[in-house]
Image (cartoon, rainbow, N blue to C red):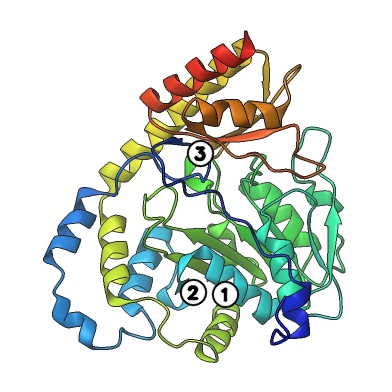
Amino acid sequence: MSKFWSPEVRELTPYVPGEQPRERLIKLNTNENPYPPAPAVEAALRDFSADHLRRYPDPTSFALREALAEELGVDTAQVFVGNGSDEVLALSFQAFFRQPRPLSMPSISYSFYPVYCRLYGVERRTHPLDDQWRVDLDAFPADAGGVIFANPNAPTGHGHGREAVAGLLERITDSVVLVDEAYVDFGGESAAPLIERFPNLLVTGTFSKSRSLAGLRLGYAVGSRELIEGLERVKDSFNSYPVDSLASALGIASLGDHEHFDACREAVITTRERTRVRLETLDFQVLPSQTNFLLVSHSELDAAQLFVGLRERGVLVRHFNTDALRDHLRISIGTDDEMDSLIEALESLCR
């Protein structure tokens, strides 16, 4: 550790992203979409004039927010955008969760949440999942300083329906409830329509997963005008130009290609269910999933050894070396050919 670091930096345990391998592997470890972005995105990239890059982008990202608002059925003033949903989440922690009361979250969820708590000095209170590994909405206390959870949850895959989220919001009215919908397009039900009824609801999303734009870094939030204004105040105190001109143009193009979006999303869902059945025939326990990944464990084989064995056979999955998850592997859904290779590798390991 450097003597030049701030004391808070010395105490941080940073988020560890999934490995981005240099060698050629079947990459099923970071929940990327196995299919390319929409053809409209490639066309917009080809037609984009480099001359635009000499000027700063629109600090309000109005055109992108307008396109998102139309897609989500909300007003443009109810939309916020940033560099990936991680940035939007980070700004949300600063804007809403630095409170005297602790922030409530599931004990197993997106592992960036505790990192943000440490970085921004947010006290947190975790609540166990229920006996079916679902986020227990009833466990969140009405007096929480805020609530955050992924829906569908990562890395477990279960999603609550809109009315279940509405029930939570009817109990918790005096603090922000943030619903992270990074995976909602793979079988979940968005809570975004509830923002008209509940001014304390903030819903975040990303272009990384279902729109195949993980390399672009685009995320968004929808909520009441007062919540969006809070995000804008923090953003304009940190970086007034978060979304560049090219990212905005490509994001707008992706939103306009519904046919490609639907086809890729359905392909992932179909492959996910096909893979689930095949894993179960190999004696894996597979949690139900409304995402583009599966969380699995084996009745006899050690997850860490399976992870190593798969890597040796050219397949990369995610193993979380934590007390709660060390017996599990998270497997992103790839193409049918990639999942066939996964099953073939597992068959050799399960003999």
What label sits on residue 78 in the rendered view?
2
Find out whether the residues at labels 3 and 2 contact each other: C-beta distance under 8 Å: no
Q: Position of residue 236 (x, y in %)?
A: 50, 90
| Earlier-in-chain disc, 1 versus 3 | 1
SS type, badge 2: helix
* Rendered residue at 56%/54% (across/down): 181
Residue 105, quarter of the rendered image: bottom right
SS type, badge 3: loop
Find out whether the residues at labels 1 and 3 contact each other: C-beta distance under 8 Å: no
Q: Mark 2 and mark 1: span between their CA atoms?
A: 6 Å
Left or right, 287 with respect to 28, comes to: right
Q: Position of residue 310 (x, y in %)?
A: 55, 27
What label sits on residue 245 in the rendered view?
none
- Circle 3 packing at 10 Å, graded few (<14), some (14-19), many (20+), is many
Find out whether the residues at labels 2 and 1 contact each other: C-beta distance under 8 Å: yes
| Earlier-in-chain disc, 2 versus 1 | 2
- At label 3, which amino acid type do we have? Asn
Left or right, 81 with respect to 256, comes to: right
- The image shows residue 312, relative to residue 260, as above or below, that is above
Seen as rendered, the residue at the extreme top is 351
- At label 1, which amino acid type do we have? Ser
- The image shows residue 199, relative to residue 150, as above or below, that is below
For the question of whether residue 351 can be seen, the reply is yes
What label sits on residue 224 in the rendered view?
1
Residue picked out by circle 3 = 292
Q: Mark 3 and mark 2: span between their CA atoms?
A: 27 Å
Q: Position of residue 241 (x, y in %)?
A: 40, 84
- At label 2, which amino acid type do we have? Gln
